[in-house]
Image (tube, helix red, strand yellow):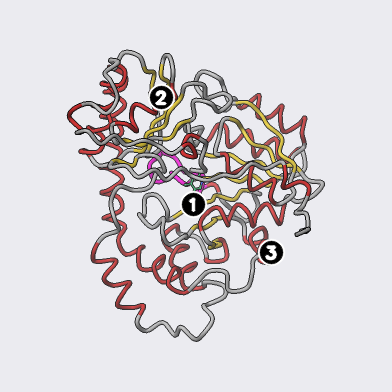
Amino acid sequence: MSRPAPRDDLRALIGYHSPQVDVEVRLNTNESPFPPPAAFVARWLAELGSVPLHRYPDRSARLLREALGASFGVPASRILCANGSNEVLQSLLLTYGGPGRRALVFEPTYALHAHIARITGTEVVVAERDPDTFAVDPDAARAAIERFRPHVVLLCDPNNPTGTSDGPRVLDALLDASSDAGPALVVVDEAYGEFARASAVERVSDDRPLVVARTYSKVWSMAALRLGYAVGPEAVLGEVESVLLPYHLDAPTQLAGMLALDYQAEMKARVSLLVEERGRLLGALEDLPGVTPYPSGANYLLFRVHGDGHAAWEGLVERGVLVRDFSRRPRLAECLRVTVGTRAENSRFLDALAEVLAGAPGGGSARGPERVTAPPAAREGGTR
Ligand SMILES: *Cc1c(COP(=O)(O)O)cnc(C)c1O
């Protein structure tokens, strides 16, 4: 069959698929290790019964936006909801990027930022994070903005996969330089904002071109539902409406997002627990000869393996523990990223890593004869 050719610029994009290897301990995609609170699930299921399924959902997700706005103390007009924060980012790039326009990213960072930008036809320009600390240097950021004159500046804070929190000084530099050079839209991806000390949400106002993207996927334990949102100036978010598909956000998801906000205390307790476990993991990794962990403001830790990072990743998989392998990504040589899981999962990971680094043979006798082996596809990068 002769078939139509897809867009030329899509050929250059390699597929981005998260490896889904079947192992006991999955610490590779930064999800919450806990399901949502049972009381929330019960209420959601009960209220779903009265959702009129033959009607389109509330097109502007008004009730959800009002509830989210109230939780941040901002009007609903400064909230935009979408299918995961990835759709928030895509919509912002469709509106403020696009052919002939540029988006600036600070590498190494979340691979989907550059990927989504390219899908929307936006040219990607790159500034470097510090190779040792992975921090964004405010002066270097300013210089990059003056040089590239981007239309959109994307900052991931805390940064995935390095865990780096850049904070207010860097944000100030970005806002300053962006208003001189354009002005550009500054987008801060705070997918892990709940785990960090500072948030850019409080800097959002109607007279500043700043949008903060957040998600229910991680701390809210709702990755399966696909709900993200942006907090930004009313005028900026208003423009985004022109690229959204009508009724893009389904009614069950809107309902879940609203009800979840009644469980803030549970969410905060989970954050505290994971932050505590993050501290324990960091301490243990620091004590482990042969690895260098990086401090993190999120629910994961990046660590460098002295020697062969990919071999260490394989050794972990053989012991039933899946982490993310960045060892062959530019700027992240020999680095792996572990999501903070339950206490038991984290201990399994630490024990397995200690074994791997001690050079014990894979699939040690403790695990029995059946070795867990990753299919070749799992050795390539994923999205999260
Ligand atoms: C996980 C993650 C997201 C979340 O994407 P959703 O589409 O909301 O699931 C966004 N940004 C970063 C940096 C992430 O790691």
In the image, what residue type sits under mark 1?
Arg
Is 200 in the magenta? yes
Q: Position of residue 204 (x, y in %)?
A: 56, 50
Q: Which residue is at 35% across, 63% downward? A: 260
**Disc nearer the start of the sequence (3/2):** 3
- Considering depth in this image, is 346 or 362 the residue closer to the camera? 362
Q: Which residue is mark 3?
A: 243
In the image, what residue type sits under mark 2?
Phe
Q: Position of residue 338 (x, y in %)?
A: 37, 34
Q: Quadrant of the N terminus?
A: bottom right
Q: Position of residue 113 (x, y in %)?
A: 60, 43
Is 144 in the magenta? no
> Marks 1 and 2, how far apart in space?
25 Å
Q: Which residue is mark 1?
A: 214
Q: Which residue is mark 2?
A: 303
1 vs 3, front mark = 3
Q: Which residue is at 45% across, 59% downward? A: 73
Q: Residues within 10 Å of mark 3 (few under 14, many from 20)?
A: few
